[in-house]
Image (cartoon, rainbow, N blue to C red):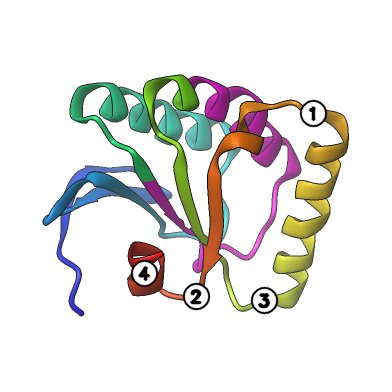
Amino acid sequence: MEIKLIEKKKFKHAVVSVISDQQSTAVVSAVTTYIPIEQFKEIFTFIGDLTKKEKITKLIFDKRELSVFHQPSMEWYFVEWKEKMYDLGLKTHRKILPKDEVFRQSVKIGRDKINKNFPNGKYTLMDIKYAETLEDAVAI
């Protein structure tokens, strides 16, 4: 299955697109090995605005180009940004991680820490799953 993306905005460290035949699905594709937190917040603030305007209900975050994990970014993403997105109807999240096992383990440890410190966050009500490819992320 070929997935056609319509670019909405290009940032220095990521590109935000929507899927042409599923316009309620946004895709954030990292294009560098690291996204500084201020750029990360700028990207996801843009997605928040896009969610309001275009009624985005599913987000795919393709992190395959990343090699540096940043816990403060992940924490902001889960406990601040997702809180707002839940109320806007963006409740389905798919993540595509790099093959790097250290990165994957860092994500697991980061999620465990967030779950321990913020057990009642709205992110716990969201449909969050991991996929290996964009096609899988779209399908699940």
- Tell me the kind of residue under disc 3: Asp
Residue, x 30% and y 29% (percent of image)?
51
How many neighbours does mark 3 have within 10 angstroms: few (below 14), some (14-19), or many (20 or more)?
A: few
User: Which tag, 3 or 2, sits closer to the chain's start?
Assistant: 3
Residue at x 28%, y 21% (from the top left corner):
52
Q: Per the image, is 29 magenta?
A: no
Q: Quadrant of the C terminus?
A: bottom left
Of residues 111 and 33, the one drawn nearer to the viewer in this rendering: 111
Q: CA distance from mark 3 to mark 2?
A: 12 Å
State the SS at label 4.
helix
Q: Amino acid under label 4?
A: Leu
Labels 4 and 1 touching (C-beta < 8 A): no
Of residues 40 and 82, the one nearer the viewer is 82
Name the residue carrying label 3.
100
The quarter in which the N terminus is drawn is bottom left
- The reply to whether the magenta stretch includes residue 66 is yes
Given residues 38 and 58, the one toward you in this image is: 58
Q: Earlier in the sequence, mark 1 or mark 2?
A: 1
Tell me which segment is drawn in magenta: 59-84
Q: How far is mark 4 from mark 2, CA to CA? A: 7 Å
| Label drawn at residue 134 | 4
Please name the residue shown 35% across and 33% down the image: 47
Q: Which label's residue is closer to the chain start, 4 or 3?
A: 3
Q: Which residue is mark 1?
A: 118
Of labels 3 and 1, earlier in sequence is: 3
| Whether label 1 touches label 2, CB < 8 Å | no
Mark 2, residue position? 132
Residue type highlighted by circle 1: Phe
Q: Characterize the local packing of mark 4: few (<14), some (14-19) or many (20 or more) Cα atoms within 10 angstroms.
A: some
Measure the C-alpha gap from mark 1 to mark 2: 27 Å
